[in-house]
Image: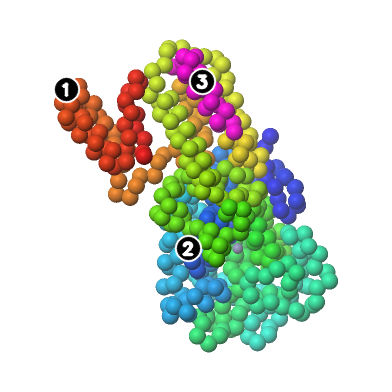
Amino acid sequence: MPLRFYNTLTQQVQPFAPIDPDVVRMYTCGPTVYAFAHIGNFRTFVFYDLLRRVLRLNGYKLHHVMNITDVDDKIIRNAVAQGKSLSDYTDTYTKAFLDDCAILRLERPERIARATEHIVEMAAAISELEQQGHTYRSDGSVYFRISTFPGYGKLSHNDFGGMVAGARVDVDSYEKSDARDFALWKAPKPGEPSWDTEIGPGRPGWHIECSVMAIEFLGNTLDIHAGGVDLIFPHHENEIAQSEALTGKPFAHYWLHSEFLLVDGQKMSKSLGNFYTLRDLCQERGHSPESIRYLLASVPYRKGLNFTMDGLKSAATAIDRLRNFKLRLESAKLEAGLNERFATASAEARKAFREALDDDLNTAEALAAIFEFVREANTAMDNGDFLSQNRASALAVLQDFDSFFDVLTPTAPAGGLTEADIDGLIAERTAAKKARDFARADGVRAQLLEQGIILEDTKDGVRWKRK
Ligand SMILES: [Zn+2]
């Protein structure tokens, strides 16, 4: 079965075929940098990463653009309140966001585009929409008249036919019941940042940012546009209206949306005390970035995810099982030969893993295939049925797993020992033992333990893991 995705636009699972057979042009909505991103935001960003990886597994090259919204209502409100310039205020959170993404091992999109660096292009697009009769002005702001775009509602599958023509909204975010003409360009207000452009002074609305940057870098029609479900309306609906009004071409062929994340079954909020950033979870509570990545990736993106501390612990246990299995595979002394049954089981596990991912990123089934294999292989090793020539194909199963889930290599603690350091010390200890210098050998073990590295002397040699 070919790679396929659920497309919000058609409400169907469809085989994926990009316009250019080799390259996927993809746009994903990035963060609004007014605060540290929280774990719900990261569910969406992990989803983008998994999407990238499954596309690459299918042999595609990627041209992926993600925006950074560094001007919007909330940013301006906060920056003004703190007496900071827009860029001083947003630089902190932009950097924090990119650091967090690296910690979670999220692949970097080919291009990250900051909204404030494309204001001229946004003004030009709005001017073009004005000339085509899709807009009107009021008090220095420019609004998109949605009645001029007959397809309005096609993504969110709403019939907006009964709307009051000419009613409008100024805020960037609003409810479906509030579908109105929306602001493309907002008139300057005293004390707020604004830009002087060909359409007058002011600043862009949120929606036009994404349309303009997507078309600028990826062309009139994208293969994939993705975001969280909360962006379907109004943001993506408005992106379609602006973009298709501008170009006369379909804006994106596939629209993919990831579901919400709840914490302990509730909507995350500061007042409930269940609002977590990556810093809260890693630095304050000591969870590993890999556990967080694993938990966010383990639930298929179109299912709601209930984030709990128990879930994080289970994720850590699952990762440990896989790491221990890998160590065992690498270090076990196996009897010579090939057990045909395990050659077949390895091939089947790899196939099932890939088929699950190609099925609209069914990560839960992909994981089930891996754990089933690990269970069988562990039992076979216990019984001596697992032979030396089965080692490579079993390691290949783990390699496939990790090229997608990317959790097997532990994150080195800041300033801690690297794997090369650890291997060097283990070699030193082995040499000391051989030379019967047991004091030195014990010293190395203690030194490693101090750094959180546990050594295990097994019949198959020395293994290590981080505490
Ligand atoms: Zn967007």
Point out the frontmost of discs 2 and 3: 3
User: In the figure, 236 relative to 287: above or below?
Assistant: below
- Secondary structure, mark 1, is loop
The structure residue drawn at horizontal position 59% and vertical position 31%, both measured from the top left corner, is 369
Residue highlighted by disc 1: 436
Point out the stretch of residues depicted in magenta: 368-390
Up the image or down, 170 lies above or below 417; here it is below
Is 383 in the magenta?
A: yes
Give the class, few, some or many, for how many residues have Cα within 10 Å of label 1's Cα (few <14, many ≥20). few
The residue wearing badge 3 is 379
Q: Which residue is nearer to you in this view: 207 or 61?
A: 207
The three-letter code of the residue at mark 2 reads Phe
Q: Report the quarter where the N terminus lies.
A: top right
Between label 1 and label 2, give the one nearer the viewer: 1
In the picture provided, is 253 more to the left or to the right than 305? right
Q: Which amino acid is tagged 1?
A: Arg
Q: Measure the C-alpha gap from mark 3 to mark 1.
A: 36 Å
Q: Is 10 left or right of 206, judged from the image as shown?
A: right
The x and y percentages for residue 384 are 46, 14
**Mark 1–mark 2 distance (CA, rounded to whole Å):** 54 Å
Within 10 Å of the Cα at label 2, are there few (<14), some (14-19), or many (20+) other Cα atoms?
A: many
Tell which quarter ligand 1 is in. bottom right
Main secondary structure found in the magenta portion: helix
